[in-house]
Image (cartoon, rainbow, N blue to C red):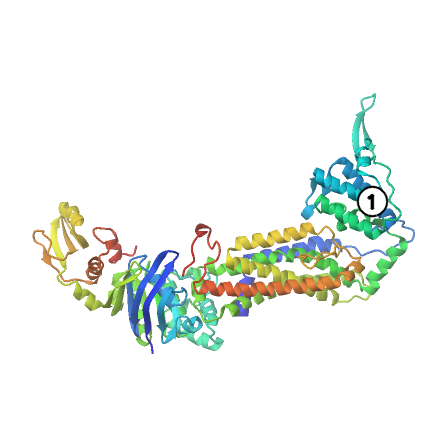
Amino acid sequence: MFFKECKKIVFSLTFLLYIFVVFAMYISQFDSDTSETVPVPSAAAGDYGYTDKAIPETLMPNAVDGLVGEYLAGEFTTYPMGFYKKVKLTEKKKTALAAVITELTGLTAEELDSFDDYVHEGYSYTANENGDIILNYQEEVIPEITIPENLAYERFTELMAEADKIIGGGSYYSKNGISWFYSRVPKTYEEALAEYNHLVYDEKVTGAYARLFCDYAGIDLAVMPVFVSAALVSLDRKSRMSDLIYSRKISSAKLVFTRFAALVAVMLIPVAVTVVMANISVSSRYPDFTVDLLAIPKLAAVWLIPNVLLAAAVGMFVTEVSSPILAVFVQGAWWMASLMSSNELTGEISLFTLICRHNSLYKYETFERTLNLFTFNRIFYTILSLVLVGLTAAVYELKRRGIWNGLFSSWKNIFRKSAV
Amino acid sequence: MDVIEIKNVNKFYGKKQALKNVSLTINQGMFGLLGRNGAGKTTLMKTLAALHKKRDGSITVCGIPIENAKEIRAVTGYLPQDFAMYGGMTVYEALDYLGALSGMPKALRKKRIDALLKRVNLSENKNIKVKALSGGMNRRMGIAQALLHDPKVLIVDEPTAGLDPEERIRFRNLLCEVAEDRIVILSTHIVGDIEAACEDIAIMNGGEILWKGTVSELIRNAEGKVFSVRVQKKYLSQIKSGHIVTGMLMQGDYTTVRMISDTAPDIENVFPAEPNCEDAYIWCLYSHGCDVYGSEDVYGAAGGDS
């Protein structure tokens, strides 16, 4: 049965689409990102890029300046679910935010509101005597701000979280926002060298590349399997074979779990091929170093299999309950929401993050710090997938016995009553 | 104990009652279930195949209560009305797949598939794609799949609709052979199939069993109720509007009309005729108060493929 289901999947059009996307993602993202080796930092270079570092002495005044500036401008930039959105506060919320700013700066609401010299940062065009257009940069003008000396960094982060909450979330003052906009500092030579050494010696090159590989592959594997699984489950209906299969002796659980196992096994084949390609590609670029050939396969197994399991399970369940179109829509919406909400691309995950990100060869410490959460996350999605497949089997049995026809089993019969 | 016992079975689709107090006993051999489209035949067949849930009443198939779906599936073979298979598979692959779903070991599957393909005359087509089969070949493959796990009961729903006369005869003969050692339930709205293949029959209408018995009894019931008359064509519409016509034979300017009636129609030169199965079926519907008077359904129900 297992191999027969595998054969059905392998010869389906949706699987061809799946293969195309998996390889396209590999070639266009991972392969192109890794086309050059990471150079050994040179002491003479001077520029080593940036790193995220929470330095209260610089972070706090910059973030508070930003908050006061936006308060005076009367609008706040936010990125809910990754989409840009301007927010204007109600009077009640403005008052609440003023109280937060007062604690951050010592400025009262009255002092803030009476500040008439506020100028928004920006550019303006003027014409000189000759008629030439001149671009003028205007710095932002805000009150002189002094952060109280007794304001601890911990209290500062609490106040910023409160400000973000008042604004509605996704602002520059959220945890991710502060990390992304106010924690970026230039890397030193020593830091760059330490990172490089960690990459090539501690992580044996492939350890770091494994995270980048999984970061990219995890994106498409969180959605593409839904197409393949929805197509497989709906094939019986499409081929008018449902009754024929319902009438056979096989148990619903055995049939559904066999199909699920076949889906996962077949869909992991192209992933395994890209893992081998990644190993060959990375190790050939670092011929002078000892590489760990198991690093990418091991991490890919833990990181990517739950994505495949979940997308396949959602595809099976929603298709069985309703329709393949809805299955693609549900998983697509979940995927989009997860992708757009991951402002932080380097390892900041929660228990329910569907698409775990780590779009960097560095920042191992972030990955290590969230390793337990990451492990729970992957176990959670694995269990959730198995639960969904179990529910699929239950729904299949109900439909098989004519007890329930499913939701919206046909667009023409949306309100069709089930047979009793 | 190869017998199917159906007692007082009711079933609803929402508020619509699809089966009304259905009771039947079906023994080994061919059993015909005759009725118009929408009479409830398919619902009853699916209920017997454990694909539909009855609301009340009891059904046992070879001693197994219908609620034991897994055991029922093991002893029944089902050929649905709109039989189809994965078009991309070959005939052999499709049968092998269904055999695997029936829990048959590989060696047994191979043996049974070869034997069945030979029996349904498809041995030479075993490697062609299902989508390339003709309608008749497709139905024969349908029988092969239903017999694959050697069931005690074969449920065949409207199997000859759309087949040409030669394929229909071949298919009926095949069913009769199969019925030698098992129960075969043939559901159809084509009276000719029932007359040619079945001894025991039941007639359904509006979800009810209107009548059950043998084909001979059905015909006997219509004795003295069938009349024939040869009239000029110009009187045809007058006769059709006033009588239940079961057949017409055009002969030049004249037409020989068969009709059913409780008493001899008041038409000149009318004479009693020997009832055939179609006449008897229409008489059965009429005598049970079904609306057959002058409707086109008479022709459809009496033997048309439409």
As shown in the figure, which amino acid type bears the numbered disc 1? Leu
Residue A273 seen in render: no
In x, y percent, where is residue A120?
79, 34
B210 and A241: which is toward the camera: B210
Query: Residue B151 sits in which quadrant?
Result: bottom left
Q: Residue at x 76, y 35 (%)?
A: A73
Residue A163 as seen in the image, left or right of residue B285: right
List the single residue furthest toward the left: B268
A124 and B291: which is toward the camera: B291
Q: Residue at x 70, y 52 (%)?
A: A342
List the single residue furthest toward the right: A44
> In which chain is the residue bearing label 1?
A
| SS of the residue under disc 1 | helix
Q: Residue at x 77, y 67 (%)?
A: A292
Query: Residue A259 sits in which quadrant?
Result: bottom right
In x, y percent, where is residue B2?
33, 76
Q: Classify the position of the C terminus of chain A by image quarter.
A: bottom left
Q: Vertically, is A403 above or below A156?
A: below
Q: Vertically, is A47 above or below A217?
A: above
List the single residue furthest toward the bottom: B1
Residue B131 seen in render: yes
Question: In this figure, which residue is indicated by the disc labeled 1?
Answer: A104
In x, y percent, where is residue A310?
61, 61
A97 and B106: which is toward the camera: A97
Query: Residue A202 sits in which quadrant?
Result: bottom right
Q: Residue at x 74, y 61 (%)?
A: A210
In x, y percent, where is residue A189?
89, 54
Residue A389 as seen in the image, left or right of residue A35: left
